[in-house]
Amino acid sequence: MRVAMVSEHASPLAALGGVDAGGQNVHVAELSRALAQAGHDVTVYTRRDDAALPDRVLAAPGVTVEHVPAGPPETVAKDDLLPFIPEFGAYLARRWAAAPPDVAHAHFWMSGLAALTAAASTGVPVVQTFHALGAVKRRHLGDADTSPPSRIQAERAISRTAAHTIATCSDEAFELTRAGTRRERITVVPCGVDLDHFCPDGPVADRRAPRRLVAVGRLVPRKGLDTTIAALRRLPDTELVIAGGPAPSRLDADPAVSRLRACAQRHRVADRVRLLGAVSRADMPALLRSADVVACTPWYEPFGIVPLEAMACGVPVVATAVGGLTDTVVDGVTGRLVPPRRPDELARVLHSLLSDPTSREIFGTAGAERAHCRYSWARIAAETARCYELVLDPCRPRHAAMTGAVR
């Protein structure tokens, strides 16, 4: 199949760790690569955010990234991109009229608007993955939500118009059906993990304390890093290493870093909290392997790739029971689930696990097995391709198309 991946703000070529660069970038990059390895031809359409970028880049065998001229060729916050989406959609319409793909797969709601605009004149079927839903984000963030006011209504229209919607977790599928999307037009296919890169065997980063917690993610409040910092005061002889945010050379000037450092000072654990800044994908497995436990404590998380990467490295995970984390982490099997924003409860669970090397080993082994059995990108690509086949052949029985789907 010829697949058009539409990812207006999340380029598969972007450096990770910025405010708008995270799991969606990884998802688009890895899914595109896995689909290409399965024999499909993939073009990723993403907005040009730098005038020096070439029109097209071969990102991997069978994967081309095409930079779409829509808005100024500079970095623009994703929540400010909506005025440029009509231009993005018009570009797709011109490209697809000349060389139509078999299917378009839109990632994020604004990509869905652009893809459906182009589909209206070209007839290309659109499969939609939201990665996050505006209604859920508004519920959790309230007035701190900077999404355009039209987002929630637009997402409902997209899910009704798209040929099929892929949800990345069961919680998202529930939210979509509650908003009026027919269940038979939704398939749950989660994010995956690179099992060659993230694996139990390999280098291990140096550590300074007898016990180590590792947390990875953007340094935004919803990631709940302040909860983990607060829990540290009840965990003696334990260091917390946080990866994410700006380059190490820019840490001192970053407001989010200052906020977390102040939090550590307030809880009198500043000497045991290390903020590394951005860590390259190449170095991430060694950092995860150095942890006794990886802590993922957001109070809002649409999916969360870090727990998968930790599990694939054979490291137990303690995560908050929110969003996609409730699908990924099996409580009492691959790690533990805790309520969000409860540092005392988090500390209790972490202390129990840090004091029990046998449980950590059992959880780590189970996590690695779960990652290999359920979350390889080859499997995720196969399930995604079945969704494409379903929209290309509507008469195809759903049970045949979806056999083996990850749910």
Image: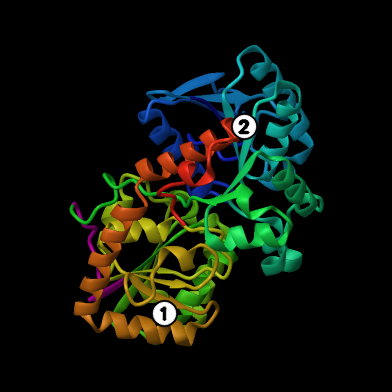
On the image, the x and y values in percent for residue 177 come to: 67, 59
The answer to whether residue 321 shows anywhere in this view is yes
Residue at the (54%, 61%) spot, across then down: 170
At label 2, the amino acid type is Asp
- The percent coordinates of residue 228 (x first, y second) are 45, 75
Percent across and percent down for residue 63 are: 44, 26
**Distance of mark 2 from mark 1, alpha carbons?**
39 Å
Magenta segment: 202-212
**Helix, strand or loop at disc 2?**
loop
Which residue is most to the top?
98
For label 2, the residue is 49
- Magenta segment, prevailing SS (helix, strand or loop): loop
Answer whether residue 203 is magenta in the image: yes
Residue 77 occupies quadrant: top right
Whether 222 is drawn above or below 393: the answer is below
- Mark on residue 269? 1
Camera-nearest residue between 231 and 390: 390
Identity of the residue drawn at 53% across and 68% down: 298
Q: Residues within 10 Å of mark 1 (few under 14, many from 20)?
A: many
Q: Nearer the viewer, residue 161 or 107?
A: 161
As helix, strand or loop, the secondary structure at mark 1 comes to loop
